[in-house]
Amino acid sequence: MTVKQFKYSTFKDPQSQLKWLNKGMFASEEKTFNENLKDLKKYPLKPDQLEIFQVNIGYQCNQTCSHCHVDAGPHRTEMMTKEVMGMCVDVIRNNNFKTVDITGGAPEMHKLFRWFVEQISDLVDEIIVRSNLTIIESNKKYHDLPYFFKSHNIRVVSSLPYFEKKRTDSQRGEGVFSNSIKALKRLNQVGYGKSDSDLILDLVYNPSGAFLPDNQENLEVSFKRNLLTNFNIEFNSLLAITNLPISRFLDFLIESDNYEDYMYKLSDSFNPAAINGLMCKNTLSVDWQGYMYDCDFNQMLKLRTADKGDSHISNFNANQLADRTIVTNQHCFGCTAGEGSSCQGVVV
């Protein structure tokens, strides 16, 4: 079943989402995520070395995607202030993060997006920008983004649900596929995704319904063949990401009566081999207000880091974060199902 278009999630209170995640099957016969960790002697889950600083600089977006766990869209006004951005820059400068992963919404819509990139450009080995592609085509002021990305050697991670118009537009909105193709061509023209270039262009695949993604390697072969044959478009890697039962996708699961079946599917597909590769092990996620989380999904559920101090970036303490317990709940089944899932694709 295709995901229905929701203008915005009905779950404005993260606590109501958590009630759904903890109800029914996990109150009776099915093991909770934490019980699975205990069986494997992995509870409480502890972090490894922090390597990735993931920062959500705002929820505003030019699209309203049906599966969006951020509930982003044109109606959102939450944007990171320059003061909080400055705190993030200081933390990045004074610690050993290898990667800064900038996300949103559409992060490029933030009026200080380019300033922020310029501040951190020489501080880390890699900057990732998670682009929805269509932002490049949405307004003339964004047409030069491929050149800006190139000037800072940014790794562009772009959303493209499928290599065909019907499935892409049904998930992300009318006209998205056409504009995504145009944006990919612009990126290719400046060298992104080309075999003779070091400019990295990755695509992200999310399933269009209540099922797990197919094998990432096989999907990548299909995407590369179809995009090259039909549109002469090249890219580097495909990242297959499992949809988590949060925000708009949770709306869809409940309204379509797929919630319990999907949760059973995730829990029945629990793969212990995925635990060591979970993104919460090496990533710190920061929201637009500067609060810290173990991952982007915990951020949407307001499950802040369980360190021994304050969870705001202004009180960043590397030693306390290294000693923290990672906050886990039933949605974590989404990251350990099958081949596993993270913002970097599969983990197994």
Image: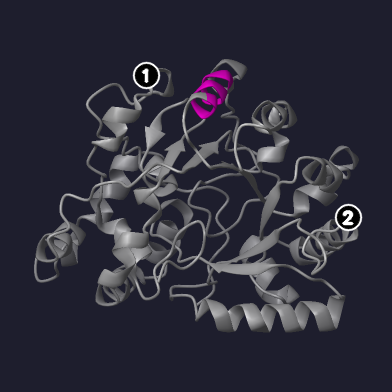
Residue 160 belongs to the span the image colors magenta: no
Q: Tell me residue 311's x, y (percent).
A: 33, 26
Q: Tell me residue 271's x, y (percent).
A: 29, 73
Q: Nearer the viewer, residue 345 or 143?
A: 345
Kindly indicate the quadrant of the structure image that contains residue 226: bottom right
Q: Nearer the viewer, residue 64 or 191?
A: 191
Please indicate whether residue 26 sits to the left or right of residue 21 in the image.
left
15 relative to 234, above or below: above
341 relative to 62, above or below: below
Please indicate whether residue 40 sits to the left or right of residue 181 in the image.
left
The span picked out in magenta is 86-93
Magenta segment's dominant SS is helix
Q: Nearer the viewer, residue 227 or 322?
A: 322
The disc label shown at residue 182, or none: none
Task: Name the residue at 24% across, 37% down.
Answer: 324
Task: Name the residue at 75% across, 61% down.
Answer: 176
Quickly name the residue at label 1: 315
User: How many C-alpha atoms fall within 10 Å of the one at disc 2: few (<14), some, or many (≥20)?
Assistant: some
The amino acid type, in three-letter code, at marker 2 is Val
Q: Tell me residue 124's x, y (percent).
A: 60, 37
Labels 2 and 1 touching (C-beta < 8 A): no
Quickly name the residue at label 2: 190
